[in-house]
Amino acid sequence: MPAVIVVGTQWGDEGKGKATDQIGADVDLVVKFNGGNNAGHTVVVNGEKYALHLLPAGILSEGVTPIIGNGVVVDLEVLFQEIEALEARGRDTSKLRISANAHVIPSYNRAMDRVTEKFLGKRQLGTTGRGIGPTYADKMNRIGIRVQDLFDESILRQKVEGALSNKNHLFTKVFNKPAVEVEEVVQELLAFADRVRPMVVDCSLEVNNALDAGKTVLFEAGQATMLDIDHGTYPFVTSSNATSGGACTGAGVGPTRIDAVVGVTKAYATRVGEGPFPTELFGEEGEDLRARGGEYGVTTGRPRRTGWFDAVVGRYATRVNGLTDLVVTKLDVLTGYEQIPVCVAYDVDGVRFDEMPADQTSFHHAKPIFEYLPGWTEDITQVRKFEDLPENAQRYIEFLEEISKVRVSVIGVGPGREASIVRHEFLK
């Protein structure tokens, strides 16, 4: 398993953390390649729950070198809070590495995120207010601050001055907020320089050298396909590339080096924040599925919107990511339903769409066309072989596999590391 990308295939929260952690136990490097602390992974190890935000899931696996890639935006205060929390629980974080080219989230971008979202009113996007979007915008506008800039005070000050020369006009004249002092921001960031310096590496060189040496590397995505800035439900998306192509740019490797792309999906669907969600459930039905699955955000605690599995989204994710394998999580949550709907196509103003509509307006008006599969009542949390699943649970997985056009290699039947059924080994 030389180089494997793990991506979410829905709107996030699919269980990528558990999948990454499981695969990561057998690899040498785990590289997070996009996003920031606007998303979280929950990993359960020996009954202990760990909520990770900035840190790659591989940090919980012995012998693995976790790397925060250049495609990630880093809130240094949050980073060290996470490190301290893990170390307090006896976890070793000494192998953590950070790309010198990763961008830093300054305090003024957190403030900008919050006031901008509030200013949008009814048109709010549902951001987490953690400064992710403004920091990626600074990166594209070439006024961003990178980790390496913390080691040159003169350069750092120039960059902060350049960014605030424009932003302070917005704060004071548009949002009626006080101006941000350059020196205050510079000192905030310099305070982290000595702590972060030993972790800083050339991510591209580290990863490519590892692959050249025959080591195994896992590339971990934050967020998911339908939140990708290019391929998601724009504008209700994140600010980075959460699809497999983002691994190449976010870690500094060429596409010819990738051997497998593993998609992770829930056995149903959830979404946090605003935006279209064709299979969404409302009222008691939606609340029942939310309660069954414990569907509350790892980072924000916000209740997730819930819905049935959407195979149109599944096929789309297979296509744009080039999936080789699928991990289906939380199959156990569906135990007890008499029948389980699966969205196989959309109805848009009387026209059937078997594939994702090309325009956002059609997707916004899409109504799900369901097929109904029989459910099961047996407890499956202790099952470890596919053939030991109830017949209807087997059929459900086979149907998802067939309709998503990618093989289901792993099935999650509980939150723990061990609560999984392996049908196929990746790369075989």
Image: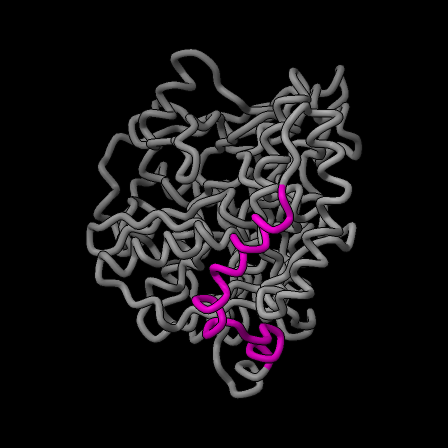
The percent coordinates of residue 161 (x first, y second) are 71, 51
The one of 362 and 421 positioned closer to us in this rendering: 362
The percent coordinates of residue 1 (x first, y second) are 49, 74
Placement of 339 over or under 38, stated as above or below: above
The magenta-colored residue range is 181-208
Q: Quadrant of residue 117?
A: top right
Q: Residue furthest top?
A: 283
Could you tell me if residue 211 is visible in this image?
yes
Q: Residue furthest bottom?
A: 213
The one of 280 and 408 positioned closer to us in this rendering: 280
The colour mode here is one colour
The percent coordinates of residue 11 (x first, y second) are 55, 38
Horizontal placement of 62 versus 279: left or right? left
Q: Residue at x 33, y 40 (%)?
A: 391
Placement of 201 over or under 38, stated as above or below: below
| Tally of numbered discs | 0
Horizontal placement of 337 versus 224: left or right? left
Could you tell me if residue 387 is visible in this image?
no
195 is within the stretch colored magenta: yes
The one of 247 and 425 positioned closer to us in this rendering: 247
Q: Main secondary structure of the magenta part?
A: helix
The percent coordinates of residue 156 (x first, y second) are 65, 61
The one of 338 and 105 positioned closer to us in this rendering: 105
Q: Residue at x 56, y 29 (%)?
A: 343
Q: Quadrant of residue 373?
A: top left
Q: Residue at x 47, y 67 (%)?
A: 196
382 is within the stretch colored magenta: no
Q: Residue at x 31, y 45 (%)?
A: 413
